[in-house]
Each structure stands twice: as structure tokens, then as C-alpha cells.
Image: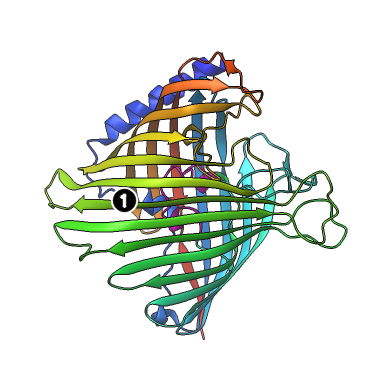
């Protein structure tokens, strides 16, 4: 019964996408809903504002095969905060982050990006709540330094095999240190996300992720044909010198990608932009035995088009022994339904469509539909023996609304 209801909702989302095709309001894509503006507004010096940031979502994942089990995500996150500009180049934000799933009454106290065993088993009642503070300094027109809560998730612009877009709905705000660097020829986002802090005698592991996302721009991004190369890397370390855990060793996991892409921006009424990108990815388990494979690689080719108010996407993925830290499980060689089982040279086709609509300044509405089809699902167990597995497919549909109004309280 549940699957039938969820399937009906997914078909309803597809119908909604089709109905929105007739919309005349300028579409924003998922950028308007998921990406936050990191710009320090010098004209707001000595202004104190209150800002409400909210993303409400309903997402259903219908997955088949041995990759991952299906599930639904009904809920929202909310960030009420005060924003103050004491100087032209300094921005301060103070508030809280709350995550609520409809129908839940307690939440594990763990980092919600890569839910793992290295966090304790404490629980929060009612809602998952964290303090929120960000101090941002614009050292120049090209360089920003961020301490506290970072511009994370979609702001890193990581490719899909490295970062699952679903984490924009569910993950904790990243916390630590971030450096943003922008020039005419190169963009760089480098950060440390400290996910688990330990005190002496703690019984869970220290954990942090170091990330880098850069783009080499070979010509003007606004040119008719723009050529570029993305360079991306993620390194996660688990385990500290002062923890008391003896059953888990220190673990260091790495993902990386380098590629080349081209974007065509003809500015036509119906075809606004097309893009093509090819990336070579790598995976390496430098220390520990958290994953059943130690190293692997993959090739990702993606084609996208902005057709009127829609963004259409298609991709081909082929890999050998590749495991992603934060990517969608369909891009990984590890099975999440059979512990220790791995796929031999998985291949995947992906198709997606999204519609993003601006309802006004600070208000965005997004509908997304995604389909995954595994072309090869030869599964082997932890003992190396083959396991019977049908070709896995996955379908997901989501509806999201981002609300981010700001109100001036006082001009000092």
C-alpha cells in the first residue's frame, strides 16, 4: 500500500512538472533554492537585520535492486538568525539550525552528513537543533575567509558522484574554516568541515572532512562557448589521538575528480544554455577498513540543457571499485542492502528534470524528478562469491520551497 501511495505521489510530481511547463515566471533552477549568496554587502555596514531561512521539502525515493532501499523525506529545516555588518568587509550571523521530519519525536545527536558510527548514541527530543554562527571577512574583492558555519552543500558545486544533492535537505550546516577565492580565470572553494569533536575519554571518534572545489576558466564565462576544467577533492579523517575506542582504527578516505567542460549559451528564447562535461574520478582508502574496497576509479559524462524554464540532465557513469563519501549510492560500488557486498564494474544511466521558479525576492519553488538505471549489476559478497541481483533502477521525485526573507531592525 505504501509503495502504491508513493508511486502515485511521484506520478503527481511528474504531472506537476508538465503543468509548470506553461509557467511564464523566470525560472531559477535549483540554484535559487539550494545555493546561498556568499557576497559581503558593504552597503549594509552598521545594519542589524533579522533573517529567516527555511527549506520545506517532500522527497520520495523508489529504489529497486541491491544498491539501496527506498525511503521518503517529509520535513523542513529552519534557520532564524540575526545578521550584522560591523564593518564594510565583515559580516556576522547568529542563530540556530533546526531540522524536523514530520512524525518524528526524537533525533540522534550526530552529524547528518554521512550518518556514521563515529558519533555517540545521544538523542534530542522534538527536533534536531544546533547553534548557528558565521563570521565572514572579505579580505579583498577576490578573497573571503569564513569561520563557524560555512557556505556548504550545493555552494561547493561538487559533481553528483561526489555529493548527493539530497544532502541539501538533510545534512547539518558545515562548521569549521573556509576560504573563497575568485578571479577572472580561477575560482576556488577550500574548507575544513569539523563533524565530530572529542574530549579526553570520549567514546566516539573525532571526524573532519577537508574539501577543495576549483574551476579553471579558459575564457570569459559569458562567451558564446565557455571552456573550463573542474578540480575537486574530498578527504575525510576519522579517529583521534585522545579517543578511547579500541574496536575501530583510524580511517582516512579520499575522493577526487578532474575534468573538462564546455557550455554553449546562445540566448535563444527556448534554448538558453547547453553544457557538456566529462570527469575522471578516483577513490582511495588510505587507512582503515571502513569500506570493503581500498581504491577505484570512475568516468562521469554529463549533458545538460536549459529549455525554456526547465533544466534537463542526462549522464553516463562507469566505474571500477569506486566508493563515494557523500555521493548518491547509485554511483558507488558498495551495496547498502548487503553489508560487505560490492558491484563489479557498475554502469549507470541517469536522467533528470527540474523546474525552479522564483515567486519573489527570497522565495523559490522547485520540482525535481530523477531516474537511475543500472546497466550492469554483477554483485559479489564479502566472501568474494557471486550474489544473484536483478538490474537496479531508481526513481525519485521531490517538491521543495525555499523561504529566505530579511528584515532591517536598526541602522546604527
Q: Is residue 156 magenta?
A: yes
Q: Is residue 93 visible?
A: no
Where does the N terminus fall, quadrant-wise? top right
Residue 108 found in image quarter: top right
10 Å neighbourhood of mark 1: few (<14), some, or many (≥20)? some
Question: Horizontal and vertical percent for residue 33?
Answer: 41, 51
Residue at 57%, 45% in the rendered image: 170
Q: Main secondary structure of the magenta part?
A: loop
Question: Start and end of the magenta stretch?
Answer: 152-169
Q: Secondary structure at mark 1?
A: loop
Label 1: which residue?
28
Q: Is residue 24 visible?
A: yes
Question: Horizontal and vertical percent for residue 123?
Answer: 78, 45
The answer to whether 85 is drawn above or below residue 232 in the figure is: below
User: Which residue ends up furthest to the right in the rendered image?
Assistant: 201
Residue 132 found in image quarter: bottom right
The answer to which of 54 and 173 lies nearer the viewer is 173
Question: Is residue 197 toward the left or the right of residue 92 in the image?
Answer: right
Residue at 38%, 42% in the rendered image: 366
The answer to which of 65 and 284 lies nearer the viewer is 284
Residue at 43%, 67% in the rendered image: 38
The answer to which of 341 and 200 lies nearer the viewer is 341
The answer to whether 314 is drawn above or below residue 384 in the figure is: below
Question: Is residue 3 toward the left or the right of residue 338 in the image?
Answer: left
Question: Horizontal and vertical percent for residue 28?
Answer: 31, 50
Amino acid at each position: 500500500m505504501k509503495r502504491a501511495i508513493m508511486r502515485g505521489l511521484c506520478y503527481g510530481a511528474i504531472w506537476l512538472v508538465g503543468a509548470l511547463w506553461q509557467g511564464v515566471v523566470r525560472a531559477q533552477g535549483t540554484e535559487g533554492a539550494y545555493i546561498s549568496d556568499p557576497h559581503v554587502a558593504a552597503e549594509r555596514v552598521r545594519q542589524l537585520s533579522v533573517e529567516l531561512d527555511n527549506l520545506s521539502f517532500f522527497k520520495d525515493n523508489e529504489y529497486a535492486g541491491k544498491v539501496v532501499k527506498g525511503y521518503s523525506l517529509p520535513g523542513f529545516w529552519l534557520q532564524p538568525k540575526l545578521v550584522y555588518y560591523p564593518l564594510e568587509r565583515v559580516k556576522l550571523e547568529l542563530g540556530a539550525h533546526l531540522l524536523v521530519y514530520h512524525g518524528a519525536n526524537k533525533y540522534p545527536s550526530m552529524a547528518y552528513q554521512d550518518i556514521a558510527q563515529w558519533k555517540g548514541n545521544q538523542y534530542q527530543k522534538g527536533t534536531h537543533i544546533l547553534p548557528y554562527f558565521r563570521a565572514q571577512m572579505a579580505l579583498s574583492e577576490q578573497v573571503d575567509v569564513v569561520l563557524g558555519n560555512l557556505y556548504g552543500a550545493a555552494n561547493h558545486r561538487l559533481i553528483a558522484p561526489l555529493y548527493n544533492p539530497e544532502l541539501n535537505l538533510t545534512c547539518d550546516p558545515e562548521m569549521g574554516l573556509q576560504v573563497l577565492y575568485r578571479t577572472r580565470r580561477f575560482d576556488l572553494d577550500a574548507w575544513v568541515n569539523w563533524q565530530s569533536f572529542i574530549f579526553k575519554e570520549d567514546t566516539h571518534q573525532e571526524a573532519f572532512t577537508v574539501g577543495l572545489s576549483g574551476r579553471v576558466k579558459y575564457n570569459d564565462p559569458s562567451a558564446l562557448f565557455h571552456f573550463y576544467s573542474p578540480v575537486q577533492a574530498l578527504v575525510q579523517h576519522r579517529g583521534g589521538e585522545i579517543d578511547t575506542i579500541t574496536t575501530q582504527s583510524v580511517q582516512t578516505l579520499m575522493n577526487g575528480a578532474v575534468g573538462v567542460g564546455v557550455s554553449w549559451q546562445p540566448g535563444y528564447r527556448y534554448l538558453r544554455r547547453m553544457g557538456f562535461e566529462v570527469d575522471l574520478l578516483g577513490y582511495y582508502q588510505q587507512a582503515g577498513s571502513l569500506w570493503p574496497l581500498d581504491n577505484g576509479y570512475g568516468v562521469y559524462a554529463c549533458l545538460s540543457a536549459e529549455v525554456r524554464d526547465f533544466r534537463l540532465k542526462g549522464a553516463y557513469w562507469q566505474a571500477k571499485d569506486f566508493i563515494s563519501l557523500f555521493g548518491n549510492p547509485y554511483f558507488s560500488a558498495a551495496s547498502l542492502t548487503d553489508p560487505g557486498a560490492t558491484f563489479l564494474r557498475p554502469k549507470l544511466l541517469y536522467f533528470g528534470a527540474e523546474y525552479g521558479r522564483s515567486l519573489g525576492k527570497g522565495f523559490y519553488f522547485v520540482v525535481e524528478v530523477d531516474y537511475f538505471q543500472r546497466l550492469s549489476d554483477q554483485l559479489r559478497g564479502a566472501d568474494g562469491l557471486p550474489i544473484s541481483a536483478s538490474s537496479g533502477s531508481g526513481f525519485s521525485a521531490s517538491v521543495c520551497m525555499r523561504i529566505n526573507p530579511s528584515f532591517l531592525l536598526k541602522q546604527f
